[in-house]
Image (spheres, helix red, strand yellow):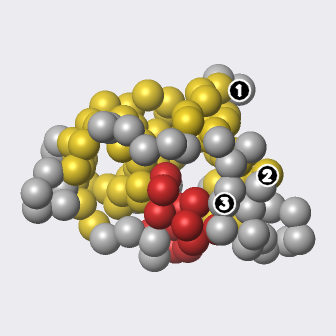
Amino acid sequence: MLVVSGSIGRTTDGVAALFDRAMLEALAPPTAIGSEDARVIPLEALLAFLGGDGARIEARSLDDDRLVIPTEPSSSSFVLVVPRPSGDAEGTLSLAEGRFDDTGRFTGEAVLERVVRLRIE
């Protein structure tokens, strides 16, 4: 479902960290974005889990669209959105930018759909 490579300390194959749905879902509690139930994983939490050390994250989609995100703290948060499967559809990951409220709920908008790869540089 997701491949993370680059400047990371924890890998699954010696080069990259390969995640399936269950592994990603274990990194975050259930939450909702709008009316869509999903699990939301802050990129900073993913970086911490992987021992990531870099100034930026390059995200790539299935369609080869790219988005570069600085890792420095800012007023908004970037998260991976893992939609809950419905029927036979697994759904695909997306990146969203937004904010967490006082209850821990994330509200934001997708900035890259069908994310399949992250590279920490």
Tally of marks: 3
SS at badge 2: strand
Badge 1: how crowded within 10 Å, few (<14), some, or many (20+)? Answer: few
The mark found on residue 92 in the picture is: none
Badge 3: how crowded within 10 Å, few (<14), some, or many (20+)? Answer: many
Please name the amino acid that badge 1 sits on: Asp
Give the image location of residue 64, x and y in percent: 71, 26
Badge 2: how crowded within 10 Å, few (<14), some, or many (20+)? Answer: some
State if disc 2 and disc 3 touch (CB < 8 Å).
Answer: yes
- Residue under label 1: 64
State if disc 1 and disc 2 touch (CB < 8 Å).
Answer: no
Q: Nearer the viewer, residue 64 or 16?
A: 16
Image quarter of residue 119: top right
Q: Nearer the viewer, residue 103 or 81?
A: 103
Residue located at (32% from left, 38% from top): 76
SS at badge 1: loop
Nearer the camera: disc 3 or disc 1? 3
**Image quadrant where one finds the C terminus:** top right
Q: CA distance from mark 2 to mark 1?
A: 18 Å
The mark found on residue 6 in the picture is: 2
Please name the amino acid that badge 3 sits on: Gly
Q: Give the answer, above or below, for where 48 lies relative to 67.
A: below
